[in-house]
Amino acid sequence: MLKNQLILCLQLNMENTNASISDLFGSFCNDKIERLEKIPQSGGDRTYYRIHTNLNTSYIATVSINVKENDAFIAFSKHFVDAGANVPKVLAVNDNREIYIQEDAGTLSLLDVLEAEGPSDKVFELYQKSLHALAFLQIKGDNNFDYSQCITSKEFGHQAIMSDLLYFKYYFLDTLKMPYDKEQLLMDFDKLAHILSDGEHKFFMFRDFQSRNIMVKENQVCFIDYQGGMKGAMQYDAASLLWQAKSNLSDDWKKKLFGYYMECVEKNLGQPIDKNHFEKQYYGYVLIRLLQVLGAYGFRGLFERKAHFLSSIPLALRNLSNFMENKSTAIVPAFFTSLLMKITDKKVIQKFETIKATTETPLVVKINSFSYLQNGYPKDESKNGGGFVFDCRGILNPGRIDEYKKQSGQDKPVKDYLEQQTLMPTFLNSVYDIVDIAVENYLERGFESLEVNFGCTGGQHRSVFAAESLHRHLKNKFGVKTVLQHLNKSNWLV
């Protein structure tokens, strides 16, 4: 009874949201909405929808109950659009300011292009365009900017820098259980924060200027997700982009692109800068950004046990190691420098790295989805037996919603529903933790077979989605061979 009521509430909420978006869209545009496509969330509590019209145009609708954050984005967008910066224009906002519609910046991010094409001339040019547009937004966008709209601090000064350093300390450094002089470290934090907060060239600071927040459309760039911005050192944004661990840019690219960025800064300022001092401050902010990211990965991975962030820790540590080995750390106090050298030691990094399968690895993981009602437990045909069976019936069933009945866990609307409207992500994180232990052990011991089964009522929605998700997870984390089967597929309602 309670489950049925919850499903009904979710349906009504989705219907009300769709109706509200349609009404708001109709307030400024006469085009007909053909469909609303829910976009997977990447962070925060905002929900995004892509509006597709009968004229093959598209728009983005954002739904969020965080009105302060909405107000910041709307106000920032208007200011930057008026200044001529590369950001989407907000076209309509509803009365309670919980829904707004903006121009569609496209589906491809700079990171998507980099991952698809590698370090090509085209990608290098897109990075240049991004840095050129960044310098313009930071400097020209700073004119008459109302920093009272900022959702956290108005300025990235001493206190904000200390906050990032402490975030790293508590959520990553302290988890290593490595002995160190805590009082001396805090003194070094304070020294570094004073040096950086007293720097010049403070303008609008994007705060999370990374390649996922740079959209590429028709070979032009557009920025999104700048609502967390504040007044601060402009070098921080360049550091965030060029030292993003996921991008893994070469040292040569970093050097050339930062040199180009300094030229863009001088052009927009209309005067030369002290490049040596500017670069020295830049490397200080590179370090701050690298440590802030490690803190975030530690919190999301080590505390919240989210697999994606756990697997990112070695990449971030290697990025920090590269910085410590090849870049000037003269701005960093001596004790802090020695401590950073210790945490980037190969033995520390190896603690977070997972064993990887090779072409000679004998292990094959067989992953099945099945129906408890129609098939029952799959029979293990391997010689060793064992493995896992996970019951997905504790997760809300999309199959009880009319629009999903003839779809499966392979279809995007069902995947979006399970990811964003149910506890499936929490369920899967627990599954990953358990299965990962077995996979690592089997790889080390040279075992040949492991079976993992997911069951639900009809074997069409929840179990299928869970099996597909584990398949991707094991491929990405271990590179292990997998065999994926949906045992009830012939009985799906399609």
Image (spheres, rainbow, N blue to C red):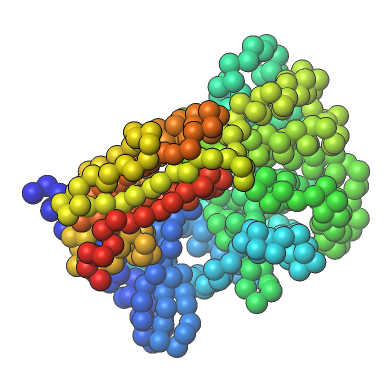
Residue 197: tell me if it is visible.
Answer: no
Seen in the picture, residue 256 relative to 431 is either above or below; the reply is below
Quadrant (top left, top right, bottom left, bottom right) of the C terminus = bottom left
Q: Is residue 79 left or right of residue 46?
A: right
Residue at the farthest left position: 1
Identity of the residue drawn at 63% across and 69% down:
216
Give residue 345's quadrant in the image: top right
Identity of the residue drawn at 40% across and 87% down:
54
The location of residue 18, given as percent across then percent down, is 30, 69
The location of residue 478, given as percent across then percent down, is 55, 41
Identity of the residue drawn at 40% across and 58% down:
47
Q: Is residue 367 left or right of residue 1?
A: right
Q: Is residue 493 left or right of residue 186?
A: left
Between 306 and 76, which is closer to the camera in this rendering? 306
Give residue 491's quadrant in the image: bottom left
Seen in the picture, residue 128 relative to 350 is either above or below; the reply is below
Seen in the picture, residue 430 relative to 4 is either above or below; the reply is above
Give residue 112's quadrant in the image: bottom right
Residue at the farthest front position: 383
Between 460 and 82, which is closer to the camera in this rendering? 460
- Please state the total of marks drawn on the protein image: 0
Identity of the residue drawn at 48% across and 44% down:
364
The location of residue 125, given as percent across then percent down, is 78, 66
Q: Is residue 366 left or right of residue 333?
A: left
Residue 393: tell me if it is visible.
Answer: yes
The location of residue 239, given as percent across then percent down, is 73, 46
Seen in the picture, residue 370 relative to 315 is either above or below; the reply is below
Between 108 and 207, which is closer to the camera in this rendering? 108
